[in-house]
């Protein structure tokens, strides 16, 4: 991460943490280089050190630091007990049209012969061994960033310990971070295109709105409560979703699906296609 990006992140943390609802600043260190913090961090070029507390009481230290003294700044996560080893060191910067991302790859190095299991566990709960955190920007709030950071900590610890609570820990948002989720949700909420897609779908099915994958019909199952209800899934792959197309959504870009099938389409990376999920059901 270049120094300008690192400085911007520190400024956002200093200026905006006080207005966060889910997070607050528990402690900030402003005397650098660090002394008596941790043997890995002491003496290095650090420009930000924050102990952040989530509303549930969990605390993490977040350092913005030149980890190897080579001009490449890292976001380093430490547990509340900073005498322990760091949880993650994020630095691989990717500049996109909507945000700047830091990409971190889970590489367990324990000596018990179970690291392959750990990587599989991490991929199961995070969606991939590559975890992407989008830095605060136009489409990503500071709270979005901090949610991803705290979730990364949870996933790392869960995978390291090969815990049994992977289902409870599974990430509900997409592994690319809030930026991609917001772009995709924007398209799925394009009301005019969705309404047109529903009308055409109903015309093809005598007024009904069955799921295009499994055939589930909300009105048939729930009566008046389910009438006119179906979810719209945007079928364009993420690689084709760019900022300039946010207002150009075609009716043909949507598949009309039930809630279960919609969730399964987004369950793993890369997303399954409608045809792939339909074939899975047939099998």
Image (cartoon, rainbow, N blue to C red):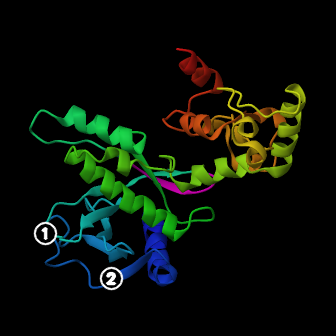
Question: In the picture, which quadrant includes the N terminus?
Answer: bottom left
Give the secondary structure at mark 1.
loop
Give left or right: position of 68 versus 207.
left
Q: Which residue is mark 1?
A: 83
Looking at the rendered structure, the secondary structure element under dot 2 is strand
Residue 41 location, x and y as percent?
A: 20, 68
1 or 2: mark nearer the eye: 2
Q: Which residue is mark 2?
A: 26
Question: Is residue 211 left or right of 131 when viewed as pictured?
Answer: right
Q: Could you classify mark 1 by the number of other residues whose Cα lies within 10 Å: few (under 14), some (14-19), or many (20 or more)?
A: few
> Residue 101: within the magenta?
yes
Q: In this view of the protein, can residue 197 be seen by the observer?
A: yes
Magenta stretch, residue numbers: 97-104
Check residue 23 for magenta coloring.
Answer: no
273 to 154, vertically: above or below: above
Q: x and y percent of residue 206 in the render?
A: 89, 28
Residue farthest left in this picture = 112
Residue 233 x %, y %: 69, 39
Q: Residue furthest top?
A: 283
Identify the residue at horizontal 40%, vertical 45% (top origin).
126
For residue 46, side relative to residue 92 (left or right): left
Task: Give the x, y percent position of residue 131.
Answer: 40, 47
Residue 29 in view = no
């Amino acid at each position: 991460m270049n120094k300008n990006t690192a400085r911007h992140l520190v400024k956002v943390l200093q200026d905006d943490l006080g207005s966060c609802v889910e997070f607050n600043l528990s402690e900030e260190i402003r005397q650098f280089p660090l002394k008596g913090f941790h043997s890995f961090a002491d003496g290095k070029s650090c420009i930000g050190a924050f102990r952040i507390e989530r509303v549930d009481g969990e605390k993490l230290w977040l350092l913005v630091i030149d980890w190897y003294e080579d001009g490449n700044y890292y976001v380093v996560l430490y547990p509340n007990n900073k005498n322990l080893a760091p949880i993650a060191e994020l630095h691989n910067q990717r500049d996109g049209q909507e945000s700047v991302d830091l990409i971190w790859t889970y590489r367990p190095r324990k000596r018990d012969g179970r690291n392959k299991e750990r990587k599989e566990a991490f991929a199961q709960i995070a969606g991939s061994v590559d975890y992407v955190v989008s830095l605060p920007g136009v489409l990503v709030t500071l709270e979005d960033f901090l949610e991803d950071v705290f979730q990364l900590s949870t996933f790392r610890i869960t995978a390291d310990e090969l815990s049994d609570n992977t289902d409870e820990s599974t990430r509900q948002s997409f592994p690319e971070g809030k930026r991609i989720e917001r772009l995709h949700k924007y398209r799925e909420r394009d009301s005019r295109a969705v309404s047109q897609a529903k009308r055409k779908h109903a015309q093809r099915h005598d007024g009904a709105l069955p799921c295009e994958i499994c055939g589930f019909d909300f009105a048939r199952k729930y009566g008046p409560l389910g009438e006119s209800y179906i979810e719209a899934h945007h079928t364009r792959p993420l690689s084709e979703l760019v900022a300039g197309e946010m207002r150009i959504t075609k009716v043909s870009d949507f598949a009309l699906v039930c809630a279960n099938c919609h969730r399964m389409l987004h369950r793993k990376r890369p997303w399954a296609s409608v045809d792939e999920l339909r074939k899975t059901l047939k099998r």
